[in-house]
Image (cartoon, helix red, strand yellow):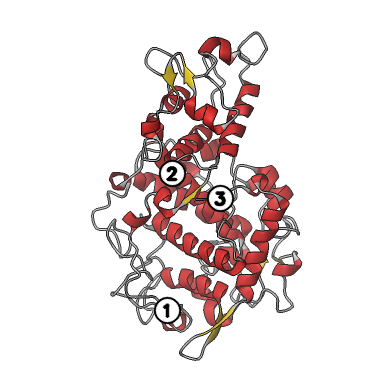
Amino acid sequence: MIVRKSPRDMTATQRNAFIKAVVDLKNEMNSLSNGTVIGSYDQHVAVHIGVTGRIRQGTPVNFGDLDGGHGGPGFLPWHREFLLRFEKDLQRVSGNSDLAVPYWDWGDHDTTFNIIFQDNFLGKHQTGGQHNVTAARFATGGKWKLDRRVHVPMIIDLVIDPMATISDMGETLFREFRSRAAMPTRAKIEELLTIGLYDDFERTIEHGTVGNQRTHDYMHGWVGGTMGTHASPYDPIFLLNHAFIDRMWALWQALGHNGSSHYTSVASPPYGHGLRNPMWPWDGTARVKTVDRIEQVLPVFDPQDRREPRDVLDCKGLNYSYVDYARVKDILDNAIGQWKTDRGRAPRLAMRHGSMFKWNTKQNLLNATALGRRLIDPAMVGNGRGYETNLIVALLRGVQNFNRMPSGGPFLPISEIAEIAHWIDMGTPG
Ligand SMILES: [Cu+2]
C-alpha cells in the first residue's frame, strides 16, 4: 500500500523523486495511430479538459452541461480515479511502485510557503500579477511547453477563475498567486469534516458554497494562471491540490461515512455521476465522445476499461492511504505535549490507564488497553469500522460513562482523529 504524504513529512530524496517523475512523464512522447505525437503527461491534461464541459461531439453547450467530472456528485470519485491513473503513470516512468503523489494541506501555511512553493519544488510564490513559474524545470525554453492542440481555445476553457483576464494561455506555465493572507484557515478546513451529508460535503469541498469555504474552486484561483483554467493539470500543483481534496474525502469517509450509502442522494445525476454510471473516459463500451480536438490526442481506452463511482469509494481496495504509523505516532506524541492535565505536567498515562497504554511501536498501539478496554479492537481493523474503535470514540466523544478524552481537553482536531480512523480502516499501514 502506498502512502500519500504532505511534503512536510517527505524526505528531500522523496520530494526530488516526485519532481523527477513529473518531468520525465512530461518529456515522454507517444506516437498515436492517427499520426499524432503527444506527451504522456499532456494526455492526462487532455483527459481533464475532455471531461470538463462537453462530453459530446460538436461543442454546442454551455459550461457545466454534461461535465462528467465537475459540478456534481461525481467530482470526488472522478478525480480519485484520475489521480490514481496519473500516479500509476508516474510510478511507471520512474520505475518506483512506491511513488505517491504528495498532498497540499491548505491549512499548513508554513509548508505551503517554505517547501511547496520554492524553486527546488514547484516554484516560488510571487505576488503582483501574472508571472511565469520561476523553477527552471517548469519554465519556458521548451522544457515545460504547453501543447496548443490540447488547450485551445482558452476562451472556452477558462472558467474557474473569474478574475483571470487571459484570452490565450500560450505555451508557458504561468500563475497569478493570491497572498498568504488569502489562504484558508485551519479552522475552516476542520469544519468540512463536520458536514453530515455527501451532497453537502461534495458541494462545499468543490465550490465552497456552504459556510463561505475556500476550497477547490477557490484554490485553483488562488494559484491562478494556468491553474485557473480547465487545462489546470499542466501545473503539477494540480496533483497536490486534488490529493488534498481526495484526502479530505477519505477522512470524511473514515468518520463513519463510508460505503455506497454515503454517496449521493441526487435522484438522477448527470452522466458519470451516479453510483453505477460509467465515468468518462473510462466508460467501457459506451465510450461517449468528447470534442474532436481532444479525441485526437487521447490515449486508447480498452472497452473493458470501465470505472464507476462505486468502484472507488474505498481507498483500501485501491491500495493507497494517507496515513502511516509514523504519522499516527506523531499525532499522539504531539498531543501529549498539549495534554498538561497533571498540574502542568504531561499526564501520567500509564498510572491512569495501566502499563499496556502505549504507542512507542505500532504493535504496542495495536495491543494497547486502557482500563481493561482494547483501544483498537482487531475486528475493527481494515474494514471501515475504525470510527467504532474505543480509541476513536474516546477522542471524539467519550466511551460510555467516560468523558471525551483527554478529560478537560485540549481535544485533538477532528482531522487528526479522522487520520487515525483512516489509518485503522486502511489496515494500519507502515
Ligand atoms: Cu478537475
Neighbour tally class for label 2: few under 14, some 14-19, many 20 plus, Cα within 10 Å = some
Residue 333 percent coordinates (x, y):
62, 28
Q: Are marks 3 and 2 in contact (CB under 8 Å)?
A: no
Mark 2 lies on a secondary structure that is: helix
Tally of numbered discs: 3
Tell which of 339 and 172 is nearer to you: 339
Instruction: Tell me the residue at 47%/36% (across/down).
Output: 418
Closer mark to the observer between disc 3 and disc 2:
3
Residue 412 percent coordinates (x, y):
54, 27
What residue is shown with label 2? 210
Q: Which amino acid type is marked by label 3?
A: Arg
Q: CA distance from mark 1 to mark 3?
A: 28 Å
Mark 1 lies on a secondary structure that is: loop
Asked whether residue 115 is in view, the answer is yes
Question: With respect to residue 150, does 428 lie above or below?
Answer: above
What residue is shown with label 3? 4
> Within the image, what quadrant is residue 224 found in?
bottom right
What residue is shown with label 1? 300
